[in-house]
Image: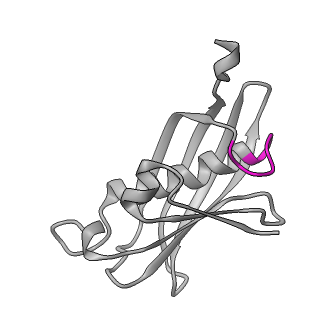
Amino acid sequence: MIERIEAETGAQETLGYILEVGHEDGGARCHLDVSSRHSNRHGVLHGGIATAILDNAMGATASLTVDPRGRSPFLTISMSTQFLAPAHVGKRVTAEAKVTGGGRSLLFIAAEMHDEDNRLIATASGVFKRARSEAAT
């Protein structure tokens, strides 16, 4: 069953994206309705915000490997983003992520961001590590 997570964190509340977990493929989805508050000086989605949405989709996907609710914290160790096309104000973008490899302590994850017309906006890849729980520190 797909669960929608909204306004759970300060970043999510500020940016206004929606996180979905529970997809059969094990990947998380982040949706953002691009508005003028997300745009850069050229009137399209700011690259930093696109990167944040991709990062969140990948981090939640990492979390889903150990927690079906997607709330176990993971840290982004490194991340690379490639921008392929502009996302325009008024369009919804969706970032989808999938685990591509890893071992005991690190996960490798890839993500793609498409707009509502299925145009590829950006891709990303990252390395993620599970955060230590408060009890373990």
- Does the rendering let one see residue 85? yes
> Where is residue 48 drawn, in percent x and y?
33, 53
Residue closest to the eye, 44 or 23: 23
Residue 82 visible to an observer of this rendering: no
Up-down relation of residue 2 to residue 107 (above or below): below
Q: Which residues are magenta?
A: 64-71
Tell me how many marks there are.
0
Reply yes or no: does residue 65 show up in magenta. yes
In the rendered image, the vertical position of residue 75 relative to residue 94, given as above or below: above
Q: Residue furthest top?
A: 137
Going 55% across and 82% down the picture, which residue do you hit?
118
* Quadrant containing the C terminus in the rendered view: top right
- Identity of the residue drawn at 32% across and 69% down: 45
Whether residue 15 sits left or right of residue 28 in the image: it is left
Residue 51 placement (x, y as % from top left): 42, 53
94 falls in the magenta region:
no
Q: Residue 133, percent across and down?
A: 67, 23
Name of the residue lying farthest toward the left: 41
Closest to the observer, 136 or 102: 136
Residue at 64% across, 21% down: 134
Q: Quadrant of the N terminus?
A: bottom right
Q: Tell me which colouring the rendered structure shows.
A: one colour
Which x, y percent locates residue 38? 30, 67
Asked if 79 appears above or below 110 in the picture, the reply is above
Q: Nearer the viewer, residue 17 or 50?
A: 17
Q: Quadrant of residue 13?
A: bottom left
Q: Residue at x 59, y 55 (%)?
A: 57
Q: Main secondary structure of the magenta part?
A: loop
